[in-house]
Amino acid sequence: SPTPVTVLGLGAMGSAIARTFLDRGHPVTVWNRTAGKAAPLAEAGASVAAGAAEAAAASPLVVVCLLDYDAVDAVLADVGGAVEGKALVNLTSGSPAQARATERWAAEHGAAYIDGGIMADPPDLGTSHAHFSFSGSRAAFEAHEPTLMELGNGTYYGEDAGLASVEFMAQVGTAYELLIGFLHTLRLVKAEGADPAEFADRVADSVAASYPPLISGIGKAVRDGAFPPDMGPLSVQAALMDDLIEHRRSNGVDTTRMVEVKRLMDRRIADGHGEEGFSGLFPLLGEKG
Ligand code: NDP
């Protein structure tokens, strides 16, 4: 029979988690600081606990999904020994160090700890579009894997509780690094009088077609330390950069990142690596000057 689950934190994500478990037939106990947010879940069959400790005591699997680690620390201080003998799964976003500190708290309170990162929007929970990274207690993960996998696709990265956050931070960081460049480019598109939405649709198509092999190839190049001419040789790419930068400048669009790319290309070419591709900039990153 489905494992009873407690969910602490009923924001957009915690509510979607609780609802997914209810839909799959689990007995679900919920608690939230602002009690009113539990009402729709109670209507859907969840038991509402009066406090965080009471909620945690109700199930062998206790899932925490709060805004940040300040909230996690505050709620776990109230939970205290109620987690003894249970699996504590913390899906709150944070750093590897914060995950490891919470693992130590769990160990001191007799709970097995699993950290998780959510790479999904709340409506995607329970579908294959939701991706989760997990790490921490292998025994607890294996015991609760079927339940956790009901939330979406999950990958377990190992016993170090920080590893799920390492993956989460890198995935989310990739999105922000890529998308800030896209947003700046939309300024250019708009300044030139083109339709940003139509342009974005074309980018969506070209990204879907060409990025998977490019991204995988760059990863392999960085791992191997050999940089084939992805996107063409740097010597050819660099010749275009001044025009790209000037076009942006003339439209009042920020050129900070483009100027940085050009500077790195010039350095790599000057070092005798003009035949390498874009991935050849990797060895220069983090160097000063
Ligand atoms: P919400 O803002 O919707 O919910 C925040 C939750 O944290 C609420 O339950 C809130 O309680 C609680 N909370 C905040 N501070 C405290 C505190 N000091 N003490 C007790 N409870 C507190 O956020 P989400 O549900 O969207 O996000 C939750 C986590 O999921 C975050 O770490 C987020 O990064 C992660 N996540 C969210 C995604 C999303 O698309 N929403 C995507 C991927 C990850 P109250 O109702 O009382 O304010």
Image (cartoon, rainbow, N blue to C red):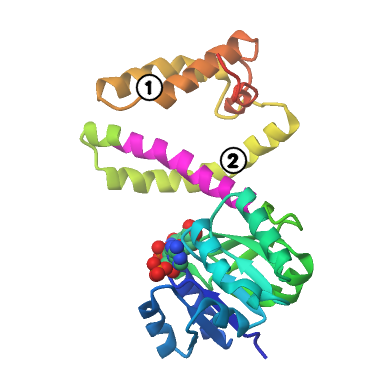
On whether residue 190 falls in the magenta region, the answer is: no
Q: Judge from the rendering whether residue 126 lies leftward or rightward of residue 102; answer left or right.
A: left
* Mark pair 2, 1: CA separation: 22 Å
Disc 2 marks which amino acid? Ile
Residue at the disc numbered 1: 244
Q: Quadrant of the N terminus?
A: bottom right
The stretch in magenta equals 164-186
Residue 151, above or below 135: below
- Residue in the picture at 30% in, 20% down: 249
Of pointers 2 and 1, the one earlier in the residue sequence: 2
Tell me the element at label 2.
Answer: helix
- Residue 136 seen by the camera: yes
Residue 252: image quadrant is top left
Residue at the disc numbered 2: 215
Residue 277: image quadrant is top right
Nearer to the camera, 163 or 235:
163
